[in-house]
Image (tube, rainbow, N blue to C red):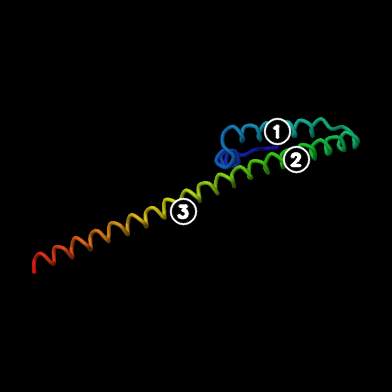
Amino acid sequence: MLITPQLSQKLQQTLGQEASAEFMNWMHQVDARVADVATRADLAEVRESMRADMAELRQEMQVGFAKMHEEMARLETRFERRHGDLIKWSFVFWVGAVGAIAMLAGVLR
């Protein structure tokens, strides 16, 4: 299988350097297996092996996505907390500013 430089670059951007290298190695192993297949029986064996590999990959991806969702939920909670703090302190600032202006207006009368 020919892996173009664009595909290689996109894989590195999407998966990261280590995962991309591992995926590329897996693709080369699959290519080597397919090239060595001589009979239909070998092809069936390779197919079953690939199914097992794909099932394992799906499982790893599900675990990875679950971890990513947990981290995103934590970040969302932190963002909401910071947003609430910002609104609270903004309110305190404006109340203080309005109070100071009211006191100055009273003094200047």
Residue at image mark 2: 54
Looking at the picture, how far across and down is residue 34, in whole percent?
79, 34
For the image, the number of numbered tags is: 3
Image quarter for residue 37? top right
| Category of crowding for the residue at label 1, using alpha-carbon neighbours closer than 10 angstroms: few (below 14), some (14–19), many (at least 20) | few
Horizontal side of residue 100 vs 18, given as left or right: left
Residue at image mark 1: 26
Q: Which-is-in-front pick, marks 3 and 1? A: 3
| Category of crowding for the residue at label 3, using alpha-carbon neighbours closer than 10 angstroms: few (below 14), some (14–19), many (at least 20) | few
Looking at the picture, how far across and down is residue 88, in whole percent?
36, 56
Q: Which-is-in-front pick, marks 3 and 2? A: 3
Looking at the image, which residue is at 18% across and 65% down? 102
Towards the viewer: 14 or 5: 14
Quarter occupied by the N terminus: top right
Cα separation, mark 1 vs mark 2, equals 11 Å
Residue flagged by tag 2: what amino acid is it? Met
The image's mark for residue 1 is: none
What kind of element bears circle 3?
Answer: helix
Q: Earlier in the sequence, mark 3 or mark 1?
A: 1
Q: Earlier in the sequence, mark 1 or mark 2?
A: 1
What kind of element bears circle 1?
Answer: helix
Horizontal side of residue 89 vs 77, given as left or right: left
What kind of element bears circle 2?
Answer: helix
Image quarter for residue 43? top right
Towards the viewer: 57 or 90: 90
Q: Which-is-in-front pick, marks 1 and 2? A: 2
Q: Is residue 89 above or below residue 47?
A: below
Looking at the image, which residue is at 79% across and 31% down? 33
Residue flagged by tag 3: what amino acid is it? Glu
Which residue is at the far left?
109
The image's mark for residue 80 is: 3
